[in-house]
């Protein structure tokens, strides 16, 4: 690993690192906030997954999450949203390619060689974090938009691995909206039957663990009606009896102003589960 940044922050340290990812076949950056802690103490970890066009910087510079992580004594990890580099496939559109990994394992060319973000988030990155930082094996996961989709699908596909899951403005039914249909066609192919394992709504029925889900959704979000579809997920959760807290926030949009307004609630939700 190579440390790219280090800043004192709320008694702890906000750092950014670079490493060579074997899973993705490229260099990857990730950010870690480590609160003040006693020597030898191992702290639980919250993973944050960002949305389309973002990298590790958006969350650490805009969300204001560090103060709450410091209060609750939890580590925050924010990876990049996709593999990157001159040798990594890309697309001119903002919603495909670099910056738009969708937290899945691509099976179609030219994406399959590098776009294995699911394996990176669930296997390689936590192994690195738990080896190189004062991190315990207690984990939770949350995210925004495309990252909210990632957090929910990862939690649902890995029962017992995460103590909590939450999301801001997540893409909840990607197989039924333009963002998901475009990305899944490119990354997974034309067979829509293969898409279901990356759709949070579709995964609910087969979930062996009823991990409570916390979602905040701004009612002034310009993507609400066409891309996010919380009503589809909510109806399926109600049908199955899956515990869901869906908070619709009047006046809030899709931005980090929205995230910063409620991130404290989400950190508290995760900390309670991680330390419970």
Image (tube, rainbow, N blue to C red):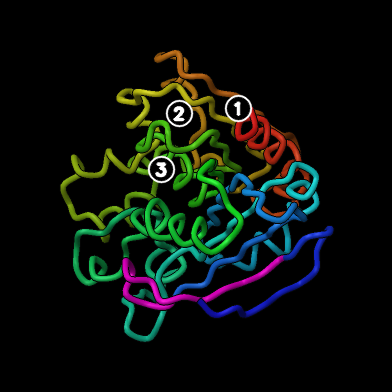
Asked whether the beta carbons under mark 1 and mark 2 sit within 8 Å of each other, the answer is yes
For discs 3 and 2, the disc positioned in front in the rendered view:
3
Quadrant hosting residue 78 = bottom right
The residues colored magenta run 14-27
Q: Name the residue under label 3.
A: 154
Q: Where is residue 209 in the image (x, y as percent from the top left)?
A: 40, 24
Judging by the rendered image, the residue that carries numbered circle 2 is 233
77 vs 264, nearest the viewer? 77
Identify the residue position indicated by label 1 in the image: 246
Does 251 lie within the magenta span?
no
Residue at the image position 48 percent from the left and 51 percent from the top: 146
> Where residue 23 sits: x, y (%)?
32, 66
Query: Is the residue marked by circle 3 packed among few (<14), some (14-19), or many (20+) residues within 10 Å?
Result: many
Q: Specify whether residue 16 is painted magenta.
A: yes
Q: Main secondary structure of the magenta part?
A: strand
> Mark 1 or mark 2: which comes first in sequence?
2
Q: Quarter-wise, where is residue 250 in the image?
A: top right
Taking the spot 46% from the left edge, 55% from the top edge, the residue there is 126
Q: Is mark 2 on a helix, strand or loop?
A: helix
Query: How far apart are labels 1 and 2 at the CA level?
Result: 10 Å
């Amino acid at each position: 690993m190579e440390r790219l940044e280090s800043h004192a922050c709320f008694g702890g340290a906000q750092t950014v690192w670079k490493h060579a990812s074997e899973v993705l076949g490229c260099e990857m950056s990730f950010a870690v906030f480590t609160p003040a802690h006693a020597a030898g103490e191992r702290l639980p970890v919250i993973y944050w997954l960002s949305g389309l066009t973002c990298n590790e910087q958006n969350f650490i510079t805009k969300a204001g999450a560090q103060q709450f992580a410091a209060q609750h004594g939890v580590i925050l990890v924010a990876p990049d949203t996709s593999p990157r580099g001159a040798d990594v496939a890309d697309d001119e559109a903002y919603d495909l390619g670099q910056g738009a990994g969708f937290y899945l394992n691509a099976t179609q060319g030219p994406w399959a060689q590098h776009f294995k973000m699911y394996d990176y988030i669930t296997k390689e990155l936590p192994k690195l974090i738990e080896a190189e930082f004062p991190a315990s094996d207690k984990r939770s996961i949350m995210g925004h938009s495309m990252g909210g989709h990632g957090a929910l699908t990862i939690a649902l596909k890995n029962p017992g691995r995460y103590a909590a899951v939450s999301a801001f403005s997540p893409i909840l039914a990607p197989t039924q909206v333009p963002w998901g249909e475009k990305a899944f066609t490119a990354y997974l192919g034309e067979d829509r039957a293969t898409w279901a394992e990356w759709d949070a709504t579709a995964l609910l029925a087969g979930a062996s663990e009823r991990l409570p889900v916390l979602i905040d959704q701004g009612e002034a979000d310009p993507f609400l009606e066409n891309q996010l579809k919380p009503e589809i997920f909510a109806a399926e959760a109600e049908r199955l009896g899956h515990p869901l807290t869906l908070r619709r926030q009047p006046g809030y949009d899709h931005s980090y102003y929205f995230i910063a307004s409620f991130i404290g609630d989400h950190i508290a939700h995760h900390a309670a589960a991680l330390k419970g």
